[in-house]
Image (spheres, helix red, strand yellow):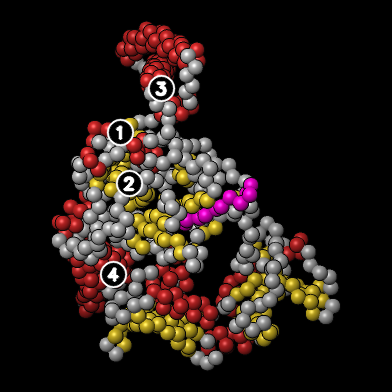
Amino acid sequence: MKKITLEFFIIISTLLVSGLKAGSQTIVDRIIAQADSARLSYDFPKAVELCQKAAELDSTAAVRVEDLRIISDNGLSMMDFCSRPVVVARQAFPLKDFLLYYPLSNHGWRKSPNQLDSLGGEGLAQAVYFPEGAKDLYYSATDENGIRNIYRTVLEDSLWTAPTLINEQLTSSSDEIYPMLSPDGESLYFASKGLYGMGGYDLYVSRWNAETGDWDIPVNMGFPYSSPYDDFLFMNTEDGRYSIFASNRGCGKDSVLIYVLEYDSMPVREAISDINALKELATLTPARDPSRMDNGAAVNDNDTSGEEARRYMDKMKEVRSLRDSVSRFSKGIENLRAEFSSASEERKAALSEEILSKELQLPVLNDSLQKAVKGLQALEMEFLANGIVLDISKLQDRADKDVVGASTGYTFSRNSYGPAPLLAMRKPERKFDYSFMILPEGRFAEDNTLPEGIVYQIQMFTQSRKATVADLKGLSPVFEKKSGSRYICSAGLFRTYADALSNLNKVKRQGFRTAEIRAYKDGESISVTSARKLESERLYTVVFYPENGQSLPDGAMDAIRETGMDVAKSVENGSVVFKVGPFHDKTEAEGLVSALKSLGSGDCSLTLSGSE
């Protein structure tokens, strides 16, 4: 009886503890959701407060809430630097092709996938802006990890240079999209999810530094250009009158708002502490002042104008409208006939009547179309006889455009996509990948020099002749060195014994049954036992004391994640300290120290466990 009672007590206790943990987890999740909702409502002070509360209630939530706390804190900081641009117009457009309504070169946007950007879709309209005559292109494309970065290619003689990332300051661990160069070439605007921002895509500008010959550190454009939502594709018009950008704030998931603002070269920044005032600013309500509007900036495409052009375009639109009607009616009849074959007897009677009705209308539409086509041809002959020269291709482009917003005083005019770009491009210089791999064809290392420190290799074989690619059986990289009259081939470069051991059987399965692990220190051969002893003694830890006494600076977690190391938070002598490690490679540890120091906001150092 006592045994049953004890077991029952243990079960009940376990359930109670599990229930308390689950309840606590539910409460924390609810607080995190409330924090994100506050951020999206521009209430950044409340969002930061709720993030701190969630971390206090559950220590495991501190890591989960860290990113949300950072972007909320960023939003709070940016409330001190708000500008008040004059809004000329605001118009909603479909997400899939909103960029065609920008006052840019017709046919300048080229759909993805294409030669520059191999991946299309992804929700936002994907296209590369490549206007005719361009010789310097900035565009967004995915890297080998599927992350969008900004690349540049330049036309040199008849070849475009191999695309390169512009620089590390404009490259984050997340996506960068829609780069647009200013008309004077001195500013690069783009949107990013991974740089200092308040969530979603924020807008940034980087200025060209003539002294360094490179782009400077990008700056978040702040309120009301950036917001907690997705903001992207900022540009200034060539005539210097307007700034334009798009955002999904305040609209459905399948659409975006395009904002037209009066260009301000020297915006005045001010602090806004009132949340309602900040939300009102972010709505960017048009001023409705006709004196500030100039439709020519939006629709000026240097097309032929005049009465003759107007007559020709009207007739062209009539022809196209009738062609669309004929096509629509023909398709409708085909669909009805397809449905008729499998319909019930009752449904067939109704379908027959509908098919007959459409078939009677189709000849009338065809006749109207033929008359409209003859009218268009007659206009062309009239112009030719009277010596009137019209640029038909431009008029066709202009007739294709949808004109939106004319009643508001600012006209958005729809451009058309251009053909896929065809660029004769230089082949990039490929850097050798020293990661251990098994490939269809093996590869010799480009440089047989071993790095400093402790490294392990898997020795494959020794033989009297120089090895061939066929001898490698797909292994890469393979290091070959000559010792006396023998050639020694070894695969891989491994920093830990465990890593080498985990790949030893892979080498043996390729046919090298006598393969064995060898160790080196600063390029010199040592015993595996000695190497493992040194490896266990030389462990490095990166120690960071945050300046604010509580949290890591912005971007620190990204740098830490790239190392793949664990991070621990503790309190020493009343101060919060973060420890990252253990590192076997001192160079890798020193790289993280440099990265954290560059972020500022704290003191960073390297500690060594064991002896050198």
Query: Which element carries disc 4, helix, strand or loop?
Result: helix
Query: The residue under label 3 is which amino acid type?
Result: Ala
Q: In this view, does 484 lie above or below 465?
A: below
Q: Contact (CB < 8 A) between labels 4 and 2?
A: no
Q: Which of marks 4 and 2 is nearer the N terminus?
A: 4
Can you identify the residue that label 4 sits on? 61
Q: Which of marks 1 and 4 is in front?
A: 1
Q: Is any part of residue 176 visible from this angle?
A: no
Can you identify the residue that label 3 sits on? 309
Q: Residue furthest bottom?
A: 611
Q: Earlier in the sequence, mark 4 or mark 3?
A: 4
208 with respect to 158 (left or right) = left
Q: Is any part of residue 457 visible from this angle?
A: yes
Q: In which quarter of the image is the N terminus?
A: bottom left
- From which residue to which does the magenta span run? 146-159
Q: Nearer the viewer, mark 1 or mark 3?
A: 3
Query: The residue under label 1 is which amino acid type?
Result: Val
Q: Which of marks 1 and 3 is nearer the N terminus?
A: 3
Give the overall secondary structure of the magenta segment.
Answer: strand
Q: Where is residue 61 in the image (x, y as percent from the top left)?
A: 28, 69
